[in-house]
Amino acid sequence: MSDYRAPVEDMDFVLQHVVNVGRFADFEPFSHVDAREIAGLLDEAGRFFSEVVAPTNRIGDTQGSQRNADGSVTTPDGVADAYRKLVDAGWGAIAFDPEYGGGGFPWVIGIAVQEMLTSANMGFSLCPLLTQGAIHALDVHGSAQQKLDWVPKMVTGEWTGTMNLTEPHAGSDVGALTSKAERRDDGTYGITGQKIFITWGEHDVADNIVHLVLARTADAPPGTKGISLFIVPKFLLNDDGTPGERNTLECVSLEHKLGIHCSPTAVMSFDDATGYLIGEEQTGMRSMFTMMNSARLSVGLEGLAVAERSYQQATQYAFERTQGARPDRAKGESAPIVEHPDVRRMLLTIKAYIEAMRCLCYLNAAALDDGHHAADAEARAAGIELAEVLTPLSKAWCTDLGNELTSLGVQVHGGMGFIEETGAAQHLRDIRIGAIYEGTNGIQAIDLIGRKLPMRDGAAIGDLLDQAEQLANSLTGDLVTFTQPLLDGVAAARQAGDWLLANRGDDSLAGATAYLRLLATVIGGWLMTKSAVAAQTELANGATGDQADFYEQKLVTTEFYVTQLLPSQFGLLPSITGGFDLIGAFQPAG
Ligand SMILES: Cc1cc2nc3c(=O)[nH]c(=O)nc-3n(C[C@H](O)[C@H](O)[C@H](O)COP(=O)(O)OP(=O)(O)OC[C@H]3O[C@@H](n4cnc5c(N)ncnc54)[C@H](O)[C@@H]3O)c2cc1C
């Protein structure tokens, strides 16, 4: 298993030049944030995650979390200790409100730190990820007392959170769930039902687990409209706020999975467990969406983070492994495989996509910061709209790419990639789930064409494409090589979007996934071109030494992305506009 080194230079580059993080200093809650100090902060975080969390990745996979006979769960050796160190260091709390004990940084800085946590150990990272989602739901929809009771300990990480939606017959169709909530005289509810696939549903790393559970009251209408959301803690609280009596819920088994073995995926049984209603009855889906939108960006980030770890490992291997001849080497001398054009192409493909994904995910997070904290209402509305458009792209594109790029990481290793001992395969196994949970990528594509594309009659996405077009037309010097592919990408995305808006129903549903891929690749092309302009400017301003090397490499990866990877996706147009007839004519034997 390779070491992990946080790619701080690229993170800081994206924050400064793509997201323009410095502007957040004008936002009242972030006036203490000095953009010039962010690289130092990321360096410090990078050291922590490399030294404390990354070493748990391998044992997390090989040992996995285990359920004991009494229903308790033991996490792999070293995980509880690393978690306690994370809580003590406060890295999980960095982007939360200081009122709750958080660090008060913009969400986009929190996302950069979360990328490191996820690269260090994806299975481990899911515990803070789910907690974050639960905090968001409580912060937006909980009562003042609920916030006081639960949120501060969740922000520090002393207590963790979960999200209990899925039931055996209710997965993508959450509205089919049947867990029951019975109103009691004291205002609490008795929650009864079984939930499956509950991430970090039971464990030994924290003193309490705050389950957020979707259930249905007796008189609720069917479907999503009738769902309510409840806080159902593992331990009820004593009068002084400390964990007390054990609630009547338990982990009845853990799933055996393809990857993320460190993360205990629990089947949870609730037997008249005490629950506290969040918001009003039958508004549960709204609260759950707050939680899921937060989690969807974080899951997209997993694609980026695990691809980064896989890339670092593959690169190291490509320098160490010698095989085959090269014209510039002595006769009979084996060359490191990194010298072979095909291996180098694989590494460059991974690296270029990683950089594009980082731009997209960070822009998505920054849009959330704008949406919540910008001074004027118009800017807040624009931030929310941008975040809504980008979220399905971040979630689905980055996790699809995470799958493809970690597979390339295995390929770079040749046969040793297929052998578990190298650890290259773990990245591929771990990220496989990213395309499935938090709404499958198919559901993300449906969200994109059904809800996001029609926003302002297509103008929400159209405005982004306009910005890409303007940038393409403004390029000068060497960067004019970016102009035509970017303009072609914009034209293809426009043509596809127009067709989907004009052809609703099964015709557009059949093209949704291909459209998501095309649109995300084009948005990635726009952001990579922005990166190239910034790198060129820094070089023109006299950057030297390591910095100049970094900017020159940035010009290589961005040019490769825009002139080679982007055009490779234009062939998706026939899939987007092909309609349903041919697909419908296919009759799989059932
Ligand atoms: C490791 C792991 C961790 C998880 N963690 C959690 C958790 O913490 N909390 C939680 O509540 N859940 C969790 N889940 C559940 C996860 O969110 C669901 O598995 C996911 O939403 C898909 O639901 P499903 O498995 O029932 O698949 P299904 O809904 O049965 O989908 C099967 C296939 O059909 C497609 N499909 C379904 N409906 C449609 C449609 N309308 N249109 C087009 N295609 C469709 C899907 O895209 C998919 O390809 C987890 C799952 C796993 C495996």
Image (cartoon, rainbow, N blue to C red):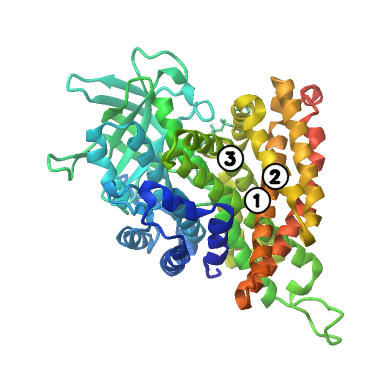
Question: Residue at 53% of width from left, 56% of height from top?
Answer: 15
Residue drawn at (28%, 42%), measured in percent from left and top? 151
Splitting the image into 4 quarters, where does residue 210 fall? top left
Element carrying mark 2: helix
| Residue 478 image offset from top left, x and y in percent | 79, 62
Residue labelled with disc 3: 390
Please name the residue shown 64% across and 73% down the image. Answer: 542
Identify the residue under disc 2. 468
For the residues carrying marks 3 and 2, which lies nearer the camera in this image? Answer: 2
Find the distance from the CA under tag 1 to the CA under tag 3: 13 Å
Element type at mark 1: helix
> x%, y% of residue 304?
58, 53
Q: Residue visible at 61% across and 72% down?
A: 547
Quadrant assignment for the C terminus: top right
> In the image, what residue type sits under mark 2?
Ala
Spot the residue most to the left. Answer: 239
Mark 1 vs mark 3, foreground winner is 1
Query: Measured from the top left, where is residue 267 in percent x and y?
Result: 41, 38
Q: Is residue 357 left or right of residue 256?
A: right
Q: Residues within 10 Å of mark 1 (few under 14, many from 20)?
A: many
Task: Find ligand 1 in the image and state its quadrant.
Answer: top right
Mark 1 beta carbon near ligand 1 (under 8 Å): no
Q: Which residue is mark 1?
A: 527
Q: Is residue 488 above or below residue 92?
A: above
Which badge, 1 or 2, comes first in the chain's sequence?
2
Q: What amino acid is found at the position of numbered circle 1 in the picture?
A: Leu
